[in-house]
Image (cartoon, helix red, strand yellow):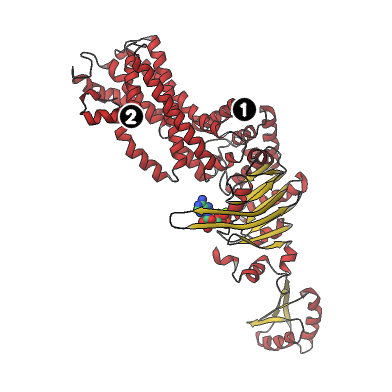
Amino acid sequence: MINARNLVRRFSLKHETVEAVRGVDIDVAPGEVVAFLGPNGAGKSTTLRMLTTLLPPSDGTAIVAGHDVRREPQEVRKRIGHIGQGNGSMDGLQVREELYTQGRFYGLDRRTSWARTSELLEQLDLAEQASRDVARLSGGQRRRLDVAMGLIHRPGLVFLDEPTTGLDPQSRANLLDHIRWLREEQDITVVLTTHYLDEADAVAERVIVIDHGQIIADGTPDQLKSKVSGDLVTVTLAEPESVDAAAEVVSRIPTAHEIESRGDVVRFRTERGDAVMPELVRALDGPGLTLRGTNVQRPTLDDVFLTLTGRSLRDDE
Amino acid sequence: MNMVTSTATVFTREVRSKIRTPWPFVESLVDPLLLLVLFGPLVAGLGGVEGLPSGDTTQWFVPGILVVMTFSTSAFIGSGIQEERQAGALERMLVTPVSRLAMLLGRVLRVVVIVAVQTVVVMAITIPFGLDVFPVGFAVAVAQLAVLAGALGVVSLAAGLALTNAYAFWGMVTIFYTPVIVTSGALLPMDLAPDWLYAVSRINPLAHVVEAQRSLFVGDVADPAVALGFGVAFAFGVAGALIGTRALNRVRV
Ligand SMILES: Nc1ncnc2c1ncn2[C@@H]1O[C@H](COP(=O)(O)OP(=O)(O)OP(=O)(O)O)[C@@H](O)[C@H]1O
Ligand SMILES: [Mg+2]
């Protein structure tokens, strides 16, 4: 679906040249759901804009949906949907009017465009709001309208730029369901950008980590997580006094490292935390230490980002 | 989708987005009427000053304020496209295959229609106050103001796209507004102007349209000033469309 080679984008400002994207190669196969993950200013939107013909690349090539973004932008536009970072709808218009108009912009005839409009309003749970002014929609509804506008012409490939930013947790979960639905029921290839690790984790089969305009990692969430050395195991003790004794027991586990004790909690990393657990519980039982709880956490993408760059993703937020 | 359908779609969307609030219409109609009521008597009081007809000045003054009205209806629409760019709506249209020129023309067509309607309304209102009717001249006058509205609208859109923020746009408007209105001769005759000011008025497209309109309002359709007014407005509009389409192709949303 996408084959991009050495994409570069520079912006000339008054006193400096900003190199927003510095030579990225991206290949996306039909049917994939790919997330671009990176902090603010990483170059995610700029990359997306080059792939969606909104911005000509300073260098490099990109074939999107079978056509070159530079030589045949019109052909690319017909075949893709793009849901930008902002609001695609204009205040003063009704939900169904915006959607219908978007269909007409894609060349659908009147009847098809109205039919698609009704269908999408239904599918994105906007039927009740059909004749409401878009200015009076909630954030989540407005975002779903944007998604509907990107789907009106049945594209095989859809780009979403930070689809859930600014939404409350419930609307966010709802939108993520709709993104999964794109893939599972509509057979659409999806490329999205996000700051949220759990989001990339939840919907994407593949994550491309971008930092300072370059790709620093590319793989399934599990592959990326395996870069981090092990799961995080947390043991909570019934009595804070026994923490030191417990830490001593943990240190005898051969694979345990990064052991930390604080308050009534001992934390450490190890390969296969789930497999280590029974052994650990038995070992703690020996000296009569009572547990209040245990927890094994697989590495998060935040841990991955930290390992790759030495910075936490959250530092930038 | 061809040019005509695309333009019509953009036009319909524009009209629908504004039709539910009457304020834009009220605003652009009230202004010329206030000028008529408040400024008209002052002009009439000037009597036979150079460049003014001796006697009744209605026939001279109405075409001038119609040009002012055309200017204030169409010269600010560039800020609307800036708002859409800011919000993200422009970006969403730019990823569709719709023609860039159609995006401009559809928006401009809205002000063209509004100006034509408003012109007829102002004519109708002023007839009872002594405006003499010249049907052919008036019809051509409406057509010419529509062309001017299109030209000003497209130039305004081009400016809205070329300037990256709202401050720059309104700054430009402020810089141009007074010189354009004063040197158009719409309110007072340019015959009163010193040579340098008169020279400035010659490069103001509005001045040529004002002169053409005054000929049309006395039924003198064959006056060369009429053709000149059309030519200037057209040339201005074509230049605006070229710059605007270019700007839309390179716009950084
Ligand atoms: N039109 C522009 N002119 C100048 N610089 C720009 C422009 N667009 C983006 N940049 C710069 O390019 C860099 C990458 O920006 P981009 O919008 O792609 O980041 P992003 O990863 O999408 O960030 P965010 O998560 O905040 O949306 C930033 O440093 C930004 O300031
Ligand atoms: Mg972005």
Indicate the chain on which mark 1 is placed.
B
Tell me, yes or no, whether the two marked residues, 1 and 2, touch with CB atoms within 8 Å. no
Compared across the picture, whether A73 is left or right of A1 comes to left
Which quadrant of the figure shows ligand 1?
bottom right
Q: CA distance from mark 1 to mark 2?
A: 35 Å
Q: Residues within 10 Å of mark 2 (few under 14, many from 20)?
A: some
Label 2 beta carbon less than 8 Å to ligand 1: no
Q: Which residue is the site of mark 1?
A: B2
Residue A122, quarter of the rendered image = top right
Q: Position of residue B92 (x, y in %)?
A: 58, 41
Question: Considering the image in quadrants, where does the N terminus of chain B appear?
Answer: top right
Compared across the picture, whether B57 is left or right of A224 comes to left
Q: Which residue is the site of mark 2?
A: B204
Q: Position of residue B34 (x, y in %)?
A: 30, 26
Q: Which amino acid, mark 1?
A: Asn
Q: Position of residue A137 (x, y in %)?
A: 57, 43
Label 1 beta carbon less than 8 Å to ligand 1: no
Q: Is residue B51 visible?
A: yes
SS assignment at label 2: loop
Residue shown at 71% from the left, 81% from the top: A257
Q: Is residue B225 above or below residue B170?
A: above
> Mark 1 or mark 2: which comes first in sequence?
1
Q: Is residue A133 above or below residue B190?
A: below
Which of the numbered marks, if any, corresponds to residue B171?
Answer: none
Residue B5, quarter of the rendered image = top right
